[in-house]
Image: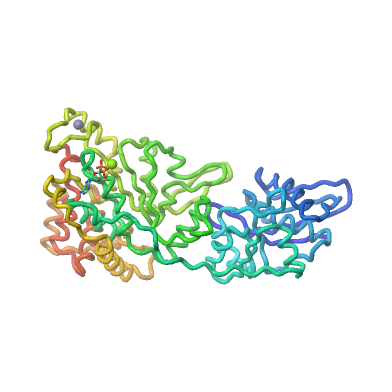
């Protein structure tokens, strides 16, 4: 007789339904798993065998054949331990076959305890789509599974506990739906930053429209300090955005039972020594890269030119497409990677080029060489290029409190609301991601604006891409101003951020 147990699998960051079919027959005792399982799936046999013995049941002396359907998709990881165990015990008559609207995922330890797995949220969402009503997961993953609407979730500690629940001896209670607690984590605040009004303004614009920013300045000017305060002014995440980002974090194994849902936009700041694979994602067991972990949030690259060239160049396509395709032995997958890129860099190797102290000893050629570590096409994608001057002594001495991040964030959220209304019914969420036709529709200029743009285009040698990018930034500046039209001064401010002396070699 064949017993079927419903389960789920992961392909990239999407879940899909898997049916575990167990067939017990006479003949020489054997235990085979077919259906394109990887090593972890093959090893499930040993874990299941031990777990069954250790929960007091008898491991059947039969020929066991397990098929993981659909057989054409590669199955990875340890989630099938639990359905395998149930399928075998049901085949042996130890328990009834599980209900047809129930599904099971979980890794077993040899003692029969259930260990947490990654990717629970996307699998739970797939369960809902497949019409599953009840989902059994390891106890540590239960909170995350409740984020998928419309499921009864049971968190299971051990296999014996589940067996007595299924036999009706001692019922488990369903997991309570997880609700976020009131925010308590304090993030650093812009109120700590003296002066630097121009840079703060640029970061406000960037946050409001999700534009990329490049900060350039001497050591100690406060670039890292400013960038690390960006999370405090990022716009609220919508529930859908939160779920999407969480799915990626879940597959990466970064969610935990206390924080199953990302409630704040991610801020990723990887070190400059990271590899191209760690940036883009990949590996045998798929791990999303930094650009996907930063989805709907910020990717901050401090010491921008120090990153490996191939790592920097790998950013270009995702910056354009909002997704990344990873090719692996198990087939290629596409992961979302819509992030706002923030880079910080010194203007030259010694760091002091353009500093009033005159300490820089680099030749013009050295400076150009250093800046050219950021390729033209990548530089072109940095919407706001901002020089961060060293703070003046007087400003530092005053020690007066600057405007708080909360006040800035209110303006950012207001500008986002305008964008949400503008793009309602489309996939676009903010100005930075407007398509070319949208730029044409929403970024009209008056005659004076056209003239100003034409002048800037010729003078700054803008490309077609930077032309559109400039208009998107101008749109955000007008939105922050609550203005329906893009006025000349909005455009002028946007142009100013494309006009950094150092990058034009005129520092
Ligand atoms: N505008 C500022 N207001 C207050 N403190 C500042 C400011 N700029 C720099 N600092 C101080 O200088 C330190 C170094 O700044 P940092 O952000 O690391 O500089 P950079 O990254 O440009 O080299 C900060 O940790 C902070 O204590
Ligand atoms: Mg720094
Ligand atoms: Zn120098």
Picture quadrant of residue 95: bottom right
- Give the image location of residue 81, x and y in percent: 69, 53
- Give the image location of residue 96, x and y in percent: 79, 66
Q: Locate the C terminus by quadrant.
A: top left
Q: Is residue 446 left or right of residue 335?
A: left
**Of 499 and 349, the residue lying toward us:** 349
Above or below, comparing residue 373 to residue 429 in the picture: above
**Of 306 and 37, the residue lying toward us:** 306
Q: Locate the N terminus by quadrant.
A: bottom right
Residue depicted at 88% across the width and 46% down the height: 28
Residue 87 can be seen in this image:
yes
- Give the image location of residue 122, x and y in percent: 54, 59
Picture quadrant of residue 271: top left
Q: Is residue 232 left or right of residue 151?
A: left
Residue furthest to the right = 27
Q: How many marks?
A: 0
Residue 436 can be seen in this image:
no
Colouring of the image:
rainbow
Q: Is residue 399 left or right of residue 155?
A: left
Residue depicted at 34% across the width and 44% down the height: 301
**Of 7 and 143, the residue lying toward us:** 143
- Give the image location of residue 434, x and y in percent: 31, 60
The image quadrant in which ligand 1 is located: top left
């Amino acid at each position: 007789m064949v017993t079927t147990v419903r389960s789920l699998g992961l392909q990239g960051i999407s879940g899909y339904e898997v049916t575990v079919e167990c067939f017990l027959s006479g003949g020489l005792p054997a235990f085979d798993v077919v259906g394109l399982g990887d090593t972890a799936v093959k090893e499930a046999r040993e874990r299941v065998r031990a777990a069954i013995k250790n929960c007091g049941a008898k491991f059947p002396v039969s020929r066991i054949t397990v098929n993981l359907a659909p057989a054409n998709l590669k199955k990875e990881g340890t989630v099938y331990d639990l359905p395998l165990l149930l399928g075998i015990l049901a085949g042996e008559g130890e328990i009834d076959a599980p209900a047809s609207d129930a599904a099971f995922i979980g890794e077993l330890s040899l003692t029969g305890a259930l260990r947490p797995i990654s990717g629970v949220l996307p699998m739970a969402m797939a369960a809902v789509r497949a019409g599953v009503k009840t989902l059994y997961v390891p106890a540590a993953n239960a909170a995350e599974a409740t984020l998928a609407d419309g499921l009864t979730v049971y968190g299971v500690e051990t296999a014996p506990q589940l067996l007595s629940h299924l036999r009706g001896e001692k019922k488990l209670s369903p997991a309570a739906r997880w609700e976020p607690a009131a925010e308590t984590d304090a993030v650093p605040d812009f109120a700590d930053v003296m002066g630097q009004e121009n840079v703060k303004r640029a970061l406000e614009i960037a946050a409001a429209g999700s534009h990329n920013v490049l900060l350039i300045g001497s050591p100690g000017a406060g670039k890292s300090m400013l960038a690390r305060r960006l999370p405090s002014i990022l716009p609220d995440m919508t529930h859908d955005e939160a779920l999407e980002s969480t799915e990626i974090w879940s597959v990466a194994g970064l969610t935990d039972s206390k924080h199953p849902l990302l409630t704040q936009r991610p801020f990723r700041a990887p070190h400059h020594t990271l590899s191209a694979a760690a940036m883009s994602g990949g590996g045998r067991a798929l791990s999303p890269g930094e650009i996907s972990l930063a989805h709907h949030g910020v990717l901050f690259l401090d010491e921008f030119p120090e990153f490996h060239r191939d790592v920097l160049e790998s950013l270009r396509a995702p910056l354009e497409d909002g997704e990344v395709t990873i090719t692996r032995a198990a087939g290629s997958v596409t992961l979302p990677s819509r992030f706002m890129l923030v880079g910080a860099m010194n203007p030259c190797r010694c760091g002091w080029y353009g500093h009033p102290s005159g300490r820089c000893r680099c030749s013009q050629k050295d400076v150009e060489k250093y800046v050219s570590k950021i390729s033209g096409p990548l530089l072109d994608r940095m919407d706001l290029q901002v020089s961060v001057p060293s703070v003046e002594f007087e400003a530092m001495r005053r020690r007066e409190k600057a405007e708080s991040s909360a006040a800035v964030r209110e303006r950012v959220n207001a500008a986002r609301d305008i964008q949400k209304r503008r793009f309602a019914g489309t996939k676009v969420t903010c100005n930075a991601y407007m398509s070319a036709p949208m730029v044409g529709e929403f970024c009209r200029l008056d005659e004076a604006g056209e003239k100003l743009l034409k002048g800037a285009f010729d003078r700054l040698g803008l490309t077609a891409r930077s032309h559109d990018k400039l208009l998107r930034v101008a749109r955000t500046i007008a939105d922050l101003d609550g203005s329906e039209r893009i006025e000349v001064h909005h455009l002028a401010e946007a142009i100013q951020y494309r006009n950094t002396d150092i990058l034009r070699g005129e520092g």
